[in-house]
Image: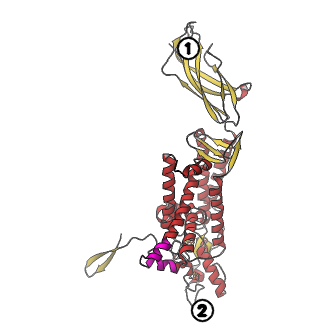
Amino acid sequence: MNTDTTLAGSADVVRAVPLTFHPRPGTVHARAVSGRFNTWRWAMVWLTQLVFYGGVWLPWRDGDAVRPALWMDIPHERLYLFDQVLWPQDALLFAFVLIVAALALFFVTALAGRLFCGFACPQTVYTMMFSWIEARIEGKPAARRALDAAPWGPRKIAIKGVKHALWWVLAAWTAITFVGYFTPIRDLLPRLTTWDVGMWEGFWLVFYASFTCVQAGFAREAVCQHMCPYSRFQGVMTDAHTRQVGYDRLRGEPRASARSVGAGDCVDCTICVQVCPTGIDIRDGVQYACINCGLCVDACDSVMDRVGRARGLIRFASEHQLAGRDLRRPRIRAAVYAALIALCAGTALWLLANRPALRVDVLRDRSVLAREAADGRIENAYLLKVANLTRHEVDYVARVDGVPGAALVGSGQLRVAANSVASLRLTVAAPDDGTLRGAQPLDVVVAPRGRPDESARERSRFLFP
Ligand code: SF4
Ligand code: SF4
């Protein structure tokens, strides 16, 4: 509950008012509008959902096998991105990709405010899809408001029931698609018919479907205003040069519903408010609740067309432009973001291009420190792990380096399948002439057979008694 304090005589009266998600109480039933920004929004819905719902079905031939082209294989710690296979050791590359994505968001925000929120954010995209279903079932905003206000009866139960059933179908398919990026969907779907799913698959299917339904069906743009941290800190990324949706007060005021001397261009039709999915009036100034969707721009442009005035009373414009100042200064903030994006993207590409095809790990056998063999040499035991990051099976040969006279007992050879890890127990023997004592540095060197210049080296220790 919010509290509203008013002064009554000499006593303070604290009046409780209901907490509302939106500036206007109740669910926002925005009026439909057509125009270029609405077209762009729906184009983004189609584009993002084609990628999301379609990407999970893409097959990829890997040698003789066919696997999903996009697949996060958690049990085997692999991320498949078309022909690239990323390992946990590629976390740095992944971190740079995330940094580039975050910087790109900062860059767009510096140029055009919450453009991502209004056009590409999953919250916006799914809210549009759920609202579209609602409008098909319940009708226009006035009919939806009337239905909300009507007492429960067979008609209301039937209409709301159909809407919620369709919402759950969409949410369930979204959840199946999401889980399909972790468990190949061609394997998951048949198992779903008998609910033959693992604990984590079952949890994510139920959670993600419920989450989608609650977020996109009920909370809608309230998420953008009250839950999303981006709306709170976007202010530090924008400045007076940032182009955001704004009302041209100089041109629009004073408002007048009829043409009169001295009146501005705003005819006070309030259509810009009626189409706003967050329920705000952009004529009150730039507000954090505005998701920059541009629908009020479409609405006002159509009104201006009808009354024969120039478009752009509400438009994407900077604070300077709306104040009548045409400042063309270099955008230091945007330039810094662009430079950082180029730097981090370049680093990520370099890391990708220089990923090693072979990774080696050596673990000392801690149960046996050092032992003396029958021939008098000192032996140490190790576990060698070799990761083959190529798309082919490879035969590797190991050798040791660093301790005079040290050599492997055995062949030191192992075969590793494509994109796999294999282990080999190693025994290293070194002569004990009494000059070396304690722990000595020892390198284990592994190379594909016949290609010693492609070797990888890992340092360990050799213990003399
Ligand atoms: S004020 Fe305009 S741009 Fe902002 S959320 Fe409302 S309709 Fe979208
Ligand atoms: S749509 Fe345009 S003309 Fe109508 S109230 Fe909004 S700003 Fe004024």
Badge 1: few (under 14), some or many (20 or more) residues near its Cα, within 10 Å?
many
Task: Give the magenta range.
Answer: 142-160
Residue visible at 62% across and 23% down in the picture = 444
Q: Quadrant of the N terminus?
A: bottom left
Is 105 on the left or on the right of 279, as rendered?
right
User: Could you tell me which secondary element the residue under label 1 belongs to?
Assistant: strand
Q: Residue at x 61, y 44 (%)?
A: 79
In the image, is residue 159 part of the stretch drawn in magenta? yes
**Front in this rendered view, residue 71 or 429:** 71
Residue 359 occupies quadrant? top right
The three-letter amino acid code for the residue at tag 1 is Glu
Q: Quadrant of residue 378?
A: top right
Relative to 17, is 57 above or below?
above
Q: Residues within 10 Å of mark 2 (few under 14, many from 20)?
A: few
Residue 379, numbered label:
1
Of the numbered discs in the image, which one, if any, rests on residue 259? 2
Q: Which marked residue is nearer to the observer: mark 1 or mark 2? A: 1
156 vs 104, left or right, is: left
* Location of residue 146 in the rendering, given as x and y in whole percent from the top left corner: 47, 80
Q: Is residue 279 magenta?
A: no
* Observer-nearest of 127 and 452: 127
